[in-house]
Amino acid sequence: MPDAHDVELIIRFRNGDQSAFVEIVLGSQNRIYNLCRRMLGNAHDAEDAAQDVFLKAYQALSRFEPGASLYTWLYRIAVNTCIDYKRKPFLESLFTRSDEGEEIMIDPPSGLPSPERLAESKQMEQILQKSLRKLSQKLRTAIILKEIEGLSYEEIAEVLDISMGTVKSRIARAREELLKLMGEA
Amino acid sequence: MKCAKTELASPYIDNELSEKDKDHFEAHLATCHECGARIQALQKARSLFSQAERYQAPYAFMTRVMARAAAQKRTKVWRLFPTVARLAEVAVVLVMISVGVLAGRFVMNSVMQQRMGNIASTFSLDLFDSAPPDSVGGTYLAMTEAVHEQ
């Protein structure tokens, strides 16, 4: 369902008000960046892809049907952008490999937790990211949209343009896979 | 043998079952150890995500997006320029050709009219208008008159 504020922003943008698009970016940049970060696994690719998402939205917003939800539309662009994203070659040098051959990007910490908390959260984060990487793209996308972005099954179906039954099935299978990876199945 | 209702465990924890299905499943959970264990395992998997970091967009992200959008817009307008310039070129050439043709026709008409007049006067004979004395016809007439007189 379209939000009244979103509809107002779209109308303003179509009337040439660039500040409307600024508001759209500011209101959704964290969600879109977070999704790209989870799907692509590192900060540089995520920022690159997230910028591409908003540029595509900028070009297509004049054709957007206000009847649809702006956020699910942006999520759809983000998912497709991440699926099609190809890492630029020079960025390969910014990655290091773990003992298991997993690519790891060194990111600056977002806050100042205690060293123990930081170590624990880093470890959990690595376990999560490592597990997500081992899922197929379809399962990874579905579970990220559900567990990290908090979308409903209906919203996920709209974003991915699949049926509710397929959403239910992919999320269940993703969880099965994660449980196996965690040794809990 | 795996309980057939374990497939409901995932949508159940997502609160995506209908009220009727939810009531039936909860009644089933009370008696099915396997489904109960499945729910616990799924909750554990979910806890991994609940502790996941929520990444924030980098500093000045919006500024970079708007700068790229503006640059893309400028490139689009600039890309049109060669086409517009080429069309203008063609239009100017066509106008010049048209003006040249029209001017040429005008000049030719005037010159031809004048020449035709000159030709008529130069080659006029006594059968048509009277020949001017300095014309070929006039000279011929003068010569023939002289011969007649003789």
Image (cartoon, rainbow, N blue to C red):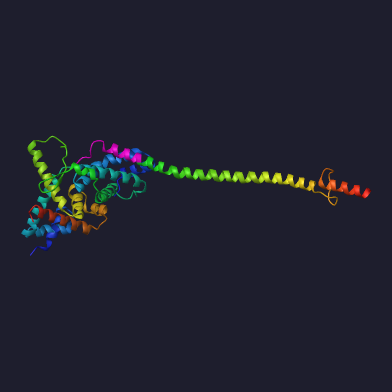
Image side of residue B101 versus residue A27, left or right: right
Image side of residue B127 versus residue B72, left or right: right
Residue B83, percent from left and from top? 45, 45
Residue B124, percent from left and from top? 81, 49
Q: In this rendered view, identify the residue nearer to me: B130 or B123.
A: B123
**Quadrant of the image for the C terminus of chain A?**
bottom left
Residue A179, percent from left and from top? 10, 54
Residue at (51, 45) in percent of width and height: B90
Q: In this rendered view, identify the residue nearer to me: A93 or B148.
A: B148
Kindly tell me whether residue A81 is visible in this rendering: yes
Residue A153 colored in magenta in the image: no
In the rendered image, which quarter is residue B100 located in? top right
Residue B67 colored in magenta in the image: yes
Residue at (9, 63) in percent of width and height: B3
Image side of residue B68 versus residue B119, left or right: left
* Stretch in magenta: B55-71
Q: In this rendered view, identify the residue nearer to me: B139 or A21.
A: B139
Magenta span dominant secondary structure: helix
Q: In this rendered view, identify the residue nearer to me: A67 or A161.
A: A161
Query: From this viewpoint, which residue is outermost toward the top?
Result: A112
Q: How many marks?
A: 0
Query: From this viewpoint, which residue is outermost toward the bottom?
Result: B1
Residue B139, percent from left and from top? 84, 46
Residue at (38, 40) in percent of width and height: B74
Kindly tell me whether residue B24 is visible in this rendering: no
